[in-house]
Amino acid sequence: MTQLPMLAIDLVAVLALVGLFLLRHRRPELAGAYLAVNVGVLAVTAVLADSTVGAGLGLGLFGVLSIIRLRSTELAHHEIAYYFAALTLGLVAGVAGTPSVLVVGLMAAVLVALWVGDHPRLAPEARTQEMVLDRAWTDMAGLTAHLEGLLGAEVLDARVTSTNLVNDTTTVTVRHRPAGPRHTGGASAAPGLAQGAGLREVGR
């Protein structure tokens, strides 16, 4: 019964985390995963904290969970950050057992770090796409200019994963964000560039 206040604090914290995630990224299918991770870790660590095993096994559990990879879909970096934040909140609440200024402050710090680190003004929205171009590009400067004209966007990073000189194709993973006025004319200046190029969005 002494752990009930800590359980309530953890519930408030994880609901705030999920609310922030939904507000920023609007992906409700991950909300259940974050809640399940938090509650599951909280339940296990709460039991371990009252047993003779001690908190050491709880920290080991954190290490085991930290290397789990979900094979169904690839998580983006910000989604992994929320995943570990939910895990951390559950672990801290379960190990602490009873609320204190330090514990509540640490849990609040996790939420503040997410709010600041995932703020749109700090990290402008960008998209990552895998593109197959109908030309074998070997000049990175020319490839970057071609991609900016094709997408009508500012290219932040372009990584060539395959260059086929026989079939004259290039596979590139490009990260881009909406560009200013200086780039908006790029797509209209080359209306035919989009033909023959395959695009597949792989994350944000």
Image (cartoon, rainbow, N blue to C red):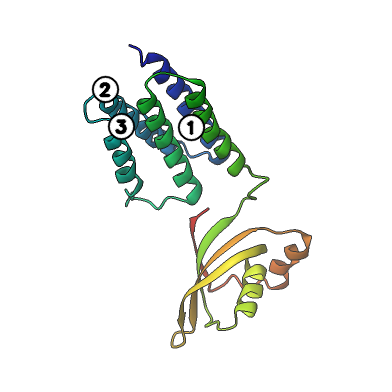
- 133 vs 57, nearest the viewer: 57
Q: Disc number at residue 74?
A: none
120 lies above or below 107? below
Single out the mark in the foreground, 2 or 1.
Answer: 2
Secondary structure at badge 1 equals helix
Q: Which amino acid does the dot numbered 1 rest on?
A: Val
Q: Residue at x 46, y 38 (%)?
A: 85
Q: Disc number at residue 50?
A: 2
* Residue that label 3 marks: 55
State how far apart marks 1 and 3 are (Cα).
26 Å
Question: Could you tell which of marks 2 and 3 lies nearer the N-terminus?
Answer: 2
Single out the mark in the foreground, 1 or 3.
Answer: 3
- Report how many numbered discs are placed on residues in the image: 3
Q: Which amino acid does the dot numbered 2 rest on?
A: Asp
Question: Are the two marked residues, 1 and 3, in contact with CB atoms closer than 8 angstroms?
Answer: no
Q: Disc number at residue 18?
A: 1
Q: Which residue is drawn at 59% across and 43% down?
A: 117
